[in-house]
Image (cartoon, helix red, strand yellow):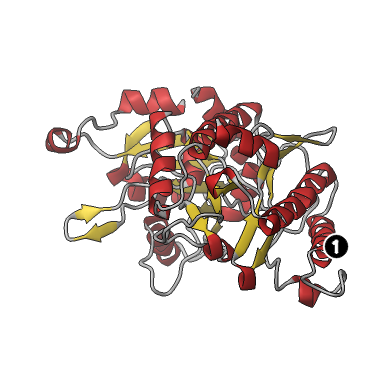
Amino acid sequence: MKASNWKKNRKKVLNRLAVGDMAIFMAADMKRKSADQFYAFVQDRDLYYLCGLDEPNVALVLQKNARFPEGQETLYIRRYSEMEAIWNGEVLDEATARKISGVDDVRFIDELRDNVSQMVTFHQSSKLSVNYPDSYMDEPLSSAHKLAQDLRLRFPDLHIKSSRTMMSKLRAFKEPWEIEQHRKAIEITRDTFIDALGFVKAGMNEYEVEAFLAYGFQKRGSKELAFETIAASGKNATILHYIKNNQPIRANSLVLLDFGATWNHYTADISRCIPVGAKFTKRSRQVYEAVLSVQKEMVEFMGPGKPMGEIRDKAIELIGVQCHKLGLIDDPADRAQISKYYMHGIGHQMGLDVHEMYGANDPLQPGMLITVEPGIYIREEGIGVRIEDDVLITPEGWENLSFDIPKEPSELLKIMKG
């Protein structure tokens, strides 16, 4: 990854700051698992987007003032500790931080509080954005929250707000190099799925499939899941966010996979179904082909200027027709009936987070990456089908980045039968 990429992203933020404005981006906190054990570190995506550093105890300060009207960048990292290097391995140093991020002014995190106070005082900063996340009553405050609280107490005239809205808008529109990261994540997901078609057998447990997918990702260089894998067989596929993955796989069932690799934290998000034993039942094929028909038509429906509300309505219309053909409902336009078998949205934006937050009701625009994922879930029959692709909105229309992940029934069966 080139430092120039992160520098360009920082410039996007600086372009949105007025003289006197400041923005602070704090690294994510380490989260304790139990006793002296911690969960694997997951970086704050906004900070990563701006400097490419995957370390805790890092902060980035961007500001405009009379002295630096075009913008000033300062990066803070933790001080080198020989003991930490002995226990945990290589520690980020100033030279490496400069090389990765492209920020020349690198200081130490224990200086952040005093330096920001000086910036506010001497440069007469009046507005500050901080990347504190939405929090819940049962969660401890993040370091970003604590910093904002501290500054609010010491500088009551300083207007402090979250930077999340600004950053979600910036991250919604992908640069060409970002799309390449997504392509690689999708390629890894594709190759792993093709391998899984020859692996899934009746009698094994869902968690064996989950483990096989994780192994496939890791052996191809993706060590981080885009999200918790869903490996749902039979009736479990009617549970939208089923992640227990602990039931035996039965013959003549479908296994619904919702899964995705990452590449440099950029995500893939794919859903496919595997007919166990390389054979659909008559009913499961009917349901599968109904969803596939909707999914293909909805991909074609995507394009710049299309409001998400219109897209959601179109999906419900098409699914209503298919549910009526399947004998599930008696009125294809009755949304109450349809919602029994299709109860989620048609898609969401994705990027560094698999669920990006910007523009849930806004028109699609070039550079956005969105999933297209209709489904039909028949609890009373124990059949759930969802088919999902990752679609890039282009000036001319759309590009299905995951077009070559098998989903046609004949293609699936051909691969499974070897």
Which is more toward the observer, 254 or 282? 282
Q: Is residue 338 above or below residue 166?
A: below
State which quadrant residue 385 falls in.
bottom right
Q: Position of residue 408 (x, y in %)?
A: 70, 40
Q: Position of residue 302 (x, y in %)?
A: 81, 45
Q: Position of residue 11 (x, y in %)?
A: 60, 33
Name the side, left or right, on which 97 lies relative to 24.
left
Q: Is residue 360 above or below residue 403?
A: below
State which quadrant residue 222 falls in.
top left
Residue projecting furthest to the bottom:
336
Q: Quadrant of the C terminus?
A: top right
Which is more toward the observer, 62 or 320? 320
Which is more toward the observer, 225 or 368? 225
Name the side, left or right, on which 320 lies relative to 360.
right
- Residue at figure coordinates x 58%, y 52% from the top left: 355
Q: Is residue 353 visible in the rendered structure shown here? A: no
Question: Mark 1 = which residue?
Answer: 321
Q: Is residue 257 visible in the rendered structure shown here? A: yes
Q: How crowded is the residue under tag 1: few (<14 C-alpha within 10 Å), some, or many (20+)?
A: some
User: How many numbered circles does the render carry?
Assistant: 1
Q: Is residue 383 above or below residue 416?
A: below
State which quadrant residue 269 falls in.
top right
Determine the secondary structure under disc 1.
helix
- Residue at figure coordinates x 63%, y 69% from the top left: 381
Residue type at numbered disc 1: Val
Q: Position of residue 215 (x, y in %)?
A: 38, 37
Name the side, left or right, on which 47 lies relative to 346.
left
